[in-house]
Image: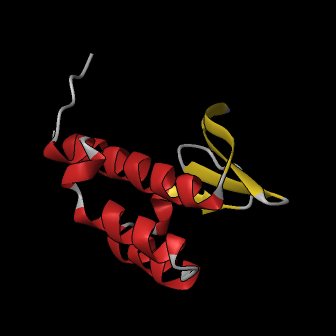
Amino acid sequence: MIAYKSKYDDPINNINVIRIRDYMEAGEEKKAWAIIEECFEESLYSIGHEEHLKVSLIKEEDKVNVKFEGEYLVQNVSINRGYIVLYNYCEKLKCISLFYKRA
């Protein structure tokens, strides 16, 4: 079993989460998405469909689901919340991936 703790676990401490939230509230989805693309490789996430070992954001009408390995991380939430959940879980997956690469 692996214990994971990071200063980034608290979204308030992560400036990118604040920036994503602010951009989404201002209706600037492209700028919010650019932060996600800048921070994470595409090997960590998928958009529109589920993929094995990726955090998946799936839009359904005006709501989104975020899933990982068949489990809902959030279900039927706003796109704003979906982006933040996607970011936070990609951050965790990135840290875990780096840990395994070092081992």
Q: Residue at x 24, y 65 (%)?
A: 15
The residue positioned 38% from the left and 66% from the top of the image is 40
x and y percent of residue 85 in the render? 48, 49
Model colouring: secondary structure
Quarter assignment of residue 37:
bottom left
Q: Is residue 10 above or below residue 72?
A: below
Residue at image coords 41%, 71%: 22
Residue 68: x %, y % from top left: 58, 39
Pinpoint residue 23: horizontal percent, then vertical percent. 46, 76
Q: Nearer the viewer, residue 41 or 17?
A: 17
Judge from the rendering whether residue 71 lies leftward or rightward of residue 7; answer left or right.
right
Looking at the image, which residue sits at the far right? 61
Total marks placed: 0
Q: Is residue 75 left or right of residue 39?
A: right
Residue under the point 53% across and 43% down? 53
Q: Residue lying farthest top?
A: 1
- Please tell me which residue lies in front, 23 or 42: 23
Closest to the observer: 95 or 58? 58
User: Is residue 50 or residue 67 the one in the foreground?
Assistant: 67
Q: The N terminus lies in which quarter of the figure?
A: top left
In the rendered image, the vertical position of residue 20 relative to residue 101, given as above or below: below
Q: Is residue 16 left or right of residue 44?
A: left
Give the position of the C terminus as an image quadrant. top left
Where on the picture, by quarter, is residue 70?
top right
